[in-house]
């Protein structure tokens, strides 16, 4: 079957109308996964509903408490036309790694999340920053943490007629920064063999008062590794604490062997990436303090 | 002594005539032509890597509305033992037809078994699913050694290589050459290195997939437009595969988005022609990326055993090189080149080299930039470097002590004429890159490479236009800036501005026979045809001026775009404008079989840094040095050197065909078949060395292929220097390097 219908609603209510009960429909943001999937025969929607004409879905808003990224806002807009890079440099690193410059012009953080690839770059960075998903369905709205939104490889928690509206990231408190790193054989146009996103908060004495560590491409979904965060809490991010966090990260990883890397390799490398991401985040905090 | 010693425009860097169309997207590539009323062809491909085709039923597909033709292998000729072409391009018809479409048996996954033509691409794809093929599935073998084992499934029970006449085997070819007495010479060596090295099967990775449009007229004549490195070869092969007289086939080459040897044969073209004849409508076919990877000829993977012996004073005294190469499902003849050329860079009086190739359930291998030499050179050059280290001699110094020069004979018994290998090594030794300190944590590797370079047949036609401009027709598809080079050479001889010369790639019936753009031969051989046509034009213009002035033609000289006698002169424009009254149109055609070819040599220096915690390698500095004879347009010589180096970097680090146990390719796309992207690479510094080729009027040597030869061993050595661990099996991807570091 080929796509039979292309709809381009301009409001959320039109979008809800267009999707009906959701059968045989796909939401289209940047299309960098959907169109490839249709071409490969992996996706076969009869109706494609474009979301980019709905203003709420492409807006990027910053208020006192949170940064809100519309689900269809392009990575390029997030990177170049918003305060996200200054607030969340790690999330910016992750978005900048999706595909290539051409791809970031189209793709969106919301689409990267909904596509739910185990290797998605933005998901560990979103989880590390405590991002929440605002979801609209026929019975109203609900909110879900990003780590609970992805339920399996290429499976998300949306019911067939539900729509991800925006991602809500709490504004970082003073002494907080994030970082994301991945390993790919190439520098771009590649899929993470392993990825690690971290967000840490340090008080003025250098003590770690908050931490979130998320890892990607080493399990069916990106994982929030609470044990790694606990290993850092209260520490000065000394080598013993880092080593304990790395061990916790490696213990949490349960990767597969495939053409992109062996399980053994991924477990090792995800620890290296977490350690380096922690060093990068700490350096950012120190720079902000100085 | 070269006929031309000083140049006015050769060696300058004007903008290529085809450049603007390419950067603005107007240039027309294979898939850019559409004909009114055209149908779309779609190929039905085997889901099995080894199977007998029991039956093919196309009736349901043909019954669909909008499906106008179907075909199977029965619509192509049944090959016997006919050979196509000669010399370098020789190929058996029975090795070509099944790469277009199978007949009775499939030997690799995604081999074509049938094709349909319909009114839309979607309908053609749908109809291809309605073709019912029954298979008897057979066991699959993809590994070289398993294919030679006693219990291996045999791909061809009717083929017996020379010397193995008794029982069927998967050994496709076996060639061995010996000079002197290598076994005795090893006895005299103080140091002997013996190691085995391997390189995976890889693909040329051209960006433009195969595409064509074919139309047949009512009289059965065929008009074919396609993306190819050689439209005369396409005509020849399409004729051989379909049985249509070559004289009834006209082929026009589109612009080409990369080929690297992979577009010197046919895949879709005969199918489009047959479907066009059957349907009476033009048929367009475009291969998708997955099928390019799965069903067109990649470069053979290979395993090379190298044994080298040297004396303490640094003299290489003996070599024994044995290369086992993957042929894929049919005979791609990869084994001869290692046998003939494995040690071509070295002075050796006692040497043996052996090439063997093996049938496996993979697509038949095809030419890729200096075919088969990069694989064997990995082993030879790494062994040379290991030997130099054992002897405590600098690797460039050791190569200089043993490098071939004029008068030395190679394994084929031919003596080198004026070659530039030593000059390249001296430039490398004195280069700032080699003299610089290696960065902390990084390593440096050096390697050199050889390619024989082809000559072959070329033609050119030069037409003088009344306004003094010139059109030049050649039959060489422009894959690397050759039109700019042709215009430069014509401009040099004629003495008229580069911008007044309009080079074109003409169709098969508009210019004399021309072999493929391949073998690094186009600037040399087609260029020589252009030079000769331009020289004929000058001679005729001088003759006409002499007639006008009523003097002997021998007294008229030609310079700066004009004929001169005493204080009289007639310019090119004068003579062009008055051609009709002075003897008629000025048209000059030349055809030649080039005998002016000279081998190419290059030396590469690579710095690489391995991240010891992740195993990931970054190429940090790269210098490619090569003898170009005379660089006609240096930009495109440098472009060849840079492009070859980049392809070698990709092959060294990440490129690799990955097959499942069932023989299905697991990475048929650029996402997981990792050619390098721009951000993976440092600036590739290209240093052109010019040791003129004495056989060519301008001193040209072919440059396109040599630069892919040295990179793999240069990079492998740099990785060793960075890590302290020797790697002899490529690719050097991060998991492999990290595992080796963990075990060391």
Image (tube, coloured by chain):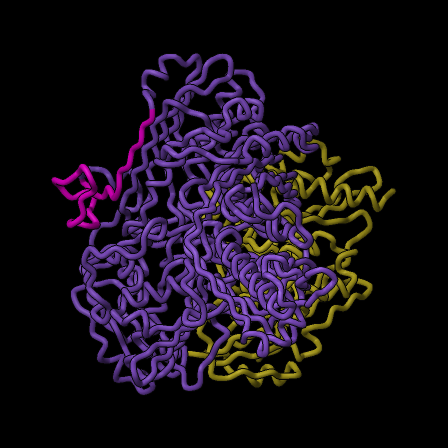
Chain colours: A yellow, B purple
Identify whether A17 is placed above or below B572. Answer: below
Region of the chain picked out in magenta, as a range? B151-179
In the rendered image, which quarter contains the C terminus of chain A? top right
**In the displayed structure image, the side of residue B216 where residue B254 appears, left or right:** right
Q: Which quadrant of the view contains residue B325?
A: top left
What residue is drawn where x is 34% and y is 86%? B66
Q: Nearer the viewer, residue B332 or A217?
A: B332
Q: Nearer the viewer, residue B208 or B411?
A: B411
Image mark count: 0
Whether residue A264 can be seen here: no
Q: In the displayed orientation, state which residue is furthest to the left.
A: B166
Majority secondary structure in the magenta region: loop
Q: Residue furthest right?
A: A290
- Name the spot of residue B195 as percent of width and height, x first: 40, 26
Q: Position of residue A245 (x, y in %)?
A: 63, 38
Looking at the picture, does residue A179 appear above or below residue B19? above
| Residue B169 on the magenta segment | yes
Q: Hey, which quadrant is residue B354 in on the image? A: top left
- Res. A284 visible in picture: yes
Is A131 positioned to the left or the right of B261 in the image? right
- For the N terminus of chain A, the quadrant is bottom left
Q: Nearer the viewer, residue A227 or B138?
A: B138
Residue drawn 70% across the image and 76% down it: A56
Residue at image x 48%, y 33%?
Answer: B739
Question: Is residue B491 shown left or right of residue A62?
Answer: left
* Horizontal and vertical percent position of residue B341: 40, 36
Q: Is residue A101 magenta?
A: no
The image shows residue B215, relative to residue B568, as above or below, that is: below
On the image, the x and y values in percent for residue B201 come to 40, 46
């Amino acid at each position: 079957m080929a796509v039979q219908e292309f709809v381009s609603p301009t409001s959320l209510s039109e979008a809800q109308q267009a999707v009906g009960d959701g059968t045989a429909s796909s939401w289209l943001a940047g299309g960098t996964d959907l169109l490839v999937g249709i071409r490969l025969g992996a996706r076969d929607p009869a109706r494609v509903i474009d979301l980019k004409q709905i203003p709420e879905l492409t807006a990027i808003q910053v208020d006192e408490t949170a940064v809100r990224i519309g689900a269809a806002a392009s990575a390029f807009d997030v990177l170049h036309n918003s305060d996200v890079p200054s607030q969340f440099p790690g999330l910016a690193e992750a978005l900048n790694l999706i595909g290539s410059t051409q791809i970031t012009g189209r793709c969106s953080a919301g689409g990267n999340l909904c596509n739910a690839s185990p290797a998605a770059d933005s998901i560990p960075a979103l989880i590390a920053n405590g991002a929440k998903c605002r979801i609209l369905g026929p019975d109203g709205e609900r909110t879900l943490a990003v780590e609970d939104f992805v339920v399996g490889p290429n499976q998300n928690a949306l019911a067939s007629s539900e729509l991800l509206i925006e991602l809500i990231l709490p504004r970082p408190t003073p002494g907080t920064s994030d970082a994301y790193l991945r390993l790919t054989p190439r520098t771009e146009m590649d899929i993470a063999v392993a990825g690690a996103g971290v967000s840490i908060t340090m008080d003025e004495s250098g003590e770690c008062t908050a931490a979130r560590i998320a890892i990607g491409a080493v399990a069916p979904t990106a994982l929030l590794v609470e044990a790694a965060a606990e290993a850092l809490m209260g520490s000065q991010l000394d080598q013993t604490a880092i080593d304990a966090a790395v061990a916790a990260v490696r213990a949490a990883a349960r990767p597969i062997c495939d053409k992109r890397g062996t399980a053994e390799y991924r477990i090792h490398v995800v620890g290296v990436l977490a350690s380096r991401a922690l060093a990068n985040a700490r350096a950012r905090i120190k720079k902000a303090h100085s | 002594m070269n006929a031309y010693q000083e140049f006015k425009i050769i060696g300058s860097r004007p903008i290529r005539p085809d450049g603007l169309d390419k950067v603005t997207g107007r240039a027309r590539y294979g898939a850019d032509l559409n004909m009114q009323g055209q149908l779309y062809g779609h190929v039905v491909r085997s889901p099995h890597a080894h199977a007998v085709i029991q039956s093919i039923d196309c009736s349901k597909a043909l019954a669909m509305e909008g499906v106008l033709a179907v075909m199977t292998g029965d619509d192509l000729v049944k090959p016997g033992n006919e050979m196509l072409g000669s010399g370098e391009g020789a190929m058996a018809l029975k090795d070509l037809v099944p790469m277009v479409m199978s007949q009775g048996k499939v030997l690799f996954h995604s081999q074509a078994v049938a094709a349909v033509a319909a009114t839309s691409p979607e309908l053609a794809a749908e109809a291809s699913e309605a073709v019912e093929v029954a298979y008897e599935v057979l066991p699959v073998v993809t590994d070289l050694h398993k294919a030679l084992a006693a219990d291996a499934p045999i791909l061809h029970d009717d083929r017996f290589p020379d010397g193995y006449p008794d029982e069927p085997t998967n050994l496709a070819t076996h060639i061995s050459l010996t000079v002197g007495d290598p076994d005795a010479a090893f006895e005299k060596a103080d140091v002997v290195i013996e190691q085995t090295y391997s390189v995976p099967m890889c693909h040329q990775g051209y960006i433009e997939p195969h595409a064509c449009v074919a139309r047949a007229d009512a009289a059965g004549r065929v008009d074919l437009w396609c993306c190819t490195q050689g439209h005369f070869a396409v005509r020849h092969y399409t004729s051989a595969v379909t049985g249509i007289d070559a004289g009834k086939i006209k082929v026009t080459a589109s612009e080409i988005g990369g080929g690297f040897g992979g577009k010197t044969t046919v895949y879709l073209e005969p199918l489009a022609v047959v479907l066009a004849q059957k349907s009476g409508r033009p048929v367009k076919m475009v291969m998708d990326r997955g099928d390019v990877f799965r069903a067109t000829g990649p470069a053979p993977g290979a395993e090379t055993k190298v044994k080298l012996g040297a004396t303490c004073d640094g003299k290489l005294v003996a070599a024994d090189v044995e290369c086992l190469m993957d042929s894929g499902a049919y005979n791609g003849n990869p084994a001869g080149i290692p046998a003939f050329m494995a040690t071509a860079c070295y002075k050796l009086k006692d040497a043996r080299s052996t090439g063997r190739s093996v049938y496996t359930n993979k697509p038949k291998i095809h030419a890729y930039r200096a075919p088969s030499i990069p694989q064997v050179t990995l082993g030879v050059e790494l062994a040379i470097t290991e030997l130099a280290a054992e002897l405590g001699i600098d690797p460039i110094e050791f190569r200089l002590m043993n490098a071939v020069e004029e008068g030395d004979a190679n394994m084929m018994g031919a003596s080198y004429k004026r070659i530039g290998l030593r000059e390249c090594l001296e430039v490398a030794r004195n280069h700032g890159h080699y003299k610089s300190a290696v960065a902390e944590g990084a390593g440096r590797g050096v390697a050199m490479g050889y390619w024989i370079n082809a000559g072959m047949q070329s033609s050119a036609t030069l037409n003088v236009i009344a306004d003094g401009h010139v059109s030049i027709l050649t039959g060489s598809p422009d894959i690397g800036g050759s039109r700019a080079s042709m215009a430069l050479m014509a401009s040099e001889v004629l003495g008229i501005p580069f911008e007044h010369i309009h080079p074109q790639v003409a169709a098969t019936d508009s210019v004399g026979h021309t072999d493929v753009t391949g073998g690094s031969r186009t600037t040399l051989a087609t260029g020589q045809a252009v030079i000769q046509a331009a020289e004929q034009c000058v001679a005729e213009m001088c003759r006409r001026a002499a007639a006008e002035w009523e003097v002997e033609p021998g007294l008229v000289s030609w310079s700066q775009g004009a004929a001169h006698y005493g204080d009289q002169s007639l310019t090119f424009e004068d003579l062009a404008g008055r051609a009709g009254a002075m003897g008629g149109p000025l048209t000059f055609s030349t055809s030649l079989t080039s005998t002016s070819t000279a081998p190419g040599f290059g030396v590469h220096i690579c710095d690489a840094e391995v991240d010891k915690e992740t195993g990931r390698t970054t190429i940090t500095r790269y210098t490619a040095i090569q003898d170009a004879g005379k660089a006609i347009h240096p930009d495109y010589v440098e472009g060849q050197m840079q492009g070859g180096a980049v392809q070698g970097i990709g092959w060294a680090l990440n490129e690799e065909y990955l097959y499942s146990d069932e023989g299905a390719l697991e990475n048929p796309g650029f996402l997981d078949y990792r050619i390098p992207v721009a951000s993976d690479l440092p600036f590739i510094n290209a240093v052109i060395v010019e040791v003129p080729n004495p056989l060519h009027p301008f001193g040209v040597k072919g440059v396109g292929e040599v630069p892919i030869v040295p990179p793999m061993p240069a990079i492998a050595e740099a990785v060793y220097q960075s890590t302290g661990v020797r790697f002899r099996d490529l690719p050097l991807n991060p998991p492999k390097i990290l595992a080796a570091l963990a075990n060391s």
